[in-house]
Amino acid sequence: MILISKIIALNWKMNKNPEETLSFLSQAREFLKNKKVNNKIVISPTFLCLKDAINFVKSKNMDMSIFAQNCHWEDQGAFTGEISAKTLKDINTNGVILGHSERKSLGENEIIFNKKLKSALKFDLEVILCIGETETEYKNNETIDTINWQIKFLLKDIDEKYRERITIAYEPIWSIGTSKTPKIEDIEKISTLIKNATKHIFEEPLKTIYGGSVNTNNFAEILAINKLDGILIGAASLSINNFFKFISFSQQ
């Protein structure tokens, strides 16, 4: 039985238009009505749907956080197609996901993610910061080294006062969208590693969640890992029926 509060984060990536977003939230509201949910629910829609989602959740007094999926490190300027952390704060976004491997595939790296992190924290946003090894690094037994150097660069010059607003998401890149997940004991091992590594930087370890091919079949087992503070769900989070199952599982 899961007794402590955990983070249930849904990353919708480039899916759902405004109508579909509001439909999902409306159904979620009905499902959650009169339920005592101990866990923190985070939903990350596309930029286009952020404002609608924020307004809906606020107007219905829902206990749910709305996160963006990315932001730029500058407050404003000639950055075509980008969104600043300042703008996210201006529309009352709760937080942002940073460092996702799908951003790395577009040429971004830990130095850029560190700059984005500093900007997001400056504007009082919560941050889910993604880390994880490639398939090559995994096969070469380089996971531990990779995680350690990612943490070192991503959290460079981050002040202790921001600690409680940062959550680390361990997402092995070889697992994302592949239906392959690490063994439970491996997830627990890396979660412990992350907590130990971040405790060397801050007074207390950062919250740590897992993402990578999470579905209704493995959700409960992963969420029950003692060292884990929650789960980041991708494709499986698009289904409202899956959402119902995730919330039900998390309350058992």
Image (spheres, rainbow, N blue to C red):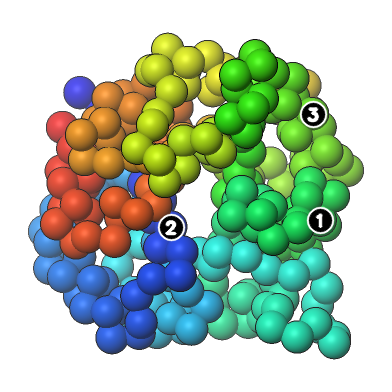
Separation (CA) of disc 2 from disc 3: 25 Å
Element at label 2: strand
| Towards the viewer: 107 or 190 | 107
Q: Residues within 10 Å of mark 1 (few under 14, many from 20)?
A: some
Label 3, on which residue? Answer: 149
106 versus 141 height, above or below: below
Q: Examine the rendering and report whether any part of residue 107 can be seen.
A: yes
| Towards the viewer: 142 or 4 | 142
Label 1, on which residue? Answer: 112
Q: Amino acid at mark 2?
A: Asn
241 versus 229 height, above or below: below
Q: Position of residue 154 (x, y in %)?
A: 78, 42
Question: Which badge, 3 or 1, is on the more N-terminal residue?
Answer: 1
Viewed as shown, does residue 84 lie left or right of 39? right
Element at label 1: helix
Label 2, on which residue? Answer: 11
142 versus 75 height, above or below: above
Q: Amino acid at mark 3?
A: Trp
Check whether the beta carbons of the residues at disc 2 and disc 3 lie within 8 A of each other.
no
Viewed as shown, does residue 77 lie left or right of 223? right
Question: Which badge, 2 or 1, is on the more N-terminal residue?
Answer: 2
Q: Residues within 10 Å of mark 2 (few under 14, many from 20)?
A: many
Element at label 3: helix
Separation (CA) of disc 2 from disc 1: 21 Å
